[in-house]
Image: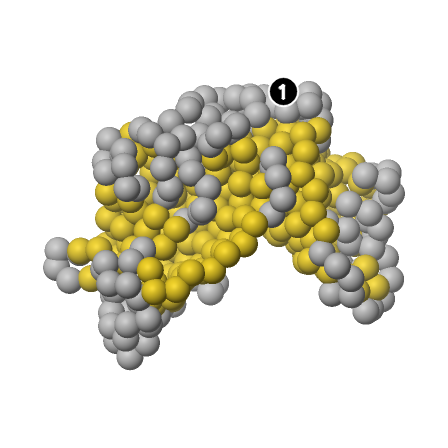
Amino acid sequence: MSGSLVLLDSVTASNDTSIILSGIDSTYDVFQVVVSNAVHSTGDYDKFRFTSGSPATPDTTAKYDNAYYVVRGLGAFYYNLVNDQTYTYISPYTKGNGSNDITNLTMHIFCANISTQGTYAYWEEASISSPSEQAIQTRGSTRHQTYQTMNGVNFFMDTGSYTSGEFRLYGLKK
Amino acid sequence: MATNYRIIKKQEFTDVTSVDITNIFNENYDVYKVCMVGGGLAGYGYLRFLDSSSNPITTANYQHGFLQMKMNSAWTQTFNTYNYLPFVFAESPTGNNPNGYNEAVFYSPYDNTRWTVVEASSRSFVSTTAFRGGTSVGALRTTDRITGIQMYSNLSNYFSGQIIVYGVRL
């Protein structure tokens, strides 16, 4: 993957309860998402889904398999795996609405534009979680089991909103 | 807008116990990837951030977590707060396989309204039969404007290598 990043979609959050980045198609093989300085209005978990259709709509079928581990600044590392979920956790640790609580991550998405395979994602998160303003590194992967194309990603929380933050979707040039 | 990763700095160092990588974080980029290949450390590469005057920040505000995955023995982990960030760059000992490969991603180090957060991974050979992978997170719990990094051996041993810094503007 020695090619360049090509910006496909960009959102600057402003009290958004849901962020959708779309533009995945057959032009590129691998896609990269970068989230920087995402701030939350209330304490909750960051989650994501893939999107499909037009307009891009989150896929809520219970087809997400997810495994992750978390290295933490204030406690022992943690790992887990879950199957057949309707979403994927970015991290099993909540972010609060404190001034230092924040989400940063880099994610790679594979096979989203191949209708004969599932869609895969792997991400590395470097964030500050609540309570106690703890540095966390989450490394996770997910697979959407359905053989279909996906055209984007959706970041959301069950409550509250992203008061600010930069969300970007890139294609990795062949 | 520089949406591609751009090389900001490439710096080689030979037989040093400490190296400063200065003026790599600035207002032109938001997220940075730092790659380091090195050898001869026979210990751990510890890290401090450099402030706006390129002086290392030595206050005890670095929170870190580290998990080391060992091929030939049980995994180990640490977490604590120090006046440095340990284990961001892992051991790269001498021997038949003297190279370690490390990479770290820094988020918004130049932003003086937020803490700086870094997550990293490392791969190294302790011997020909002991490969180790490391993964770590760190946060400087102050809003200092960070312009560079200082890497040094925790055992004051000599090491050599190369660091390449990439930046992307969101």
Q: Nearer the viewer, residue A27 or B89?
A: B89
Quick check: can you spot residue A76?
A: yes
Residue A82 image point, x, y percent: 42, 60
A33 relative to A69 in the view: left or right: left
B154 relative to B108 in the view: left or right: right
Q: Secondary structure at mark 1?
A: loop
Q: Residue at x 51, y 48 (%)?
A: A138
A43 relative to A19 in the view: left or right: right
Q: Residue at x 50, y 42 (%)?
A: A126
User: Circle 1 marks a residue in which chain?
Assistant: B
Give the quadrant of residue B133: bottom right
Give the quadrant of residue A98: top left
Query: Which residue in the protein does label 1 denote?
Result: B53
Q: Count neighbours of disc 1 (C-alpha within 10 A) and say few if under 14, some if 14 to 19, many if 20 or more.
A: few
Query: Three-letter amino acid code at disc 1?
Result: Ser
Residue B58 image point, x, y percent: 71, 23
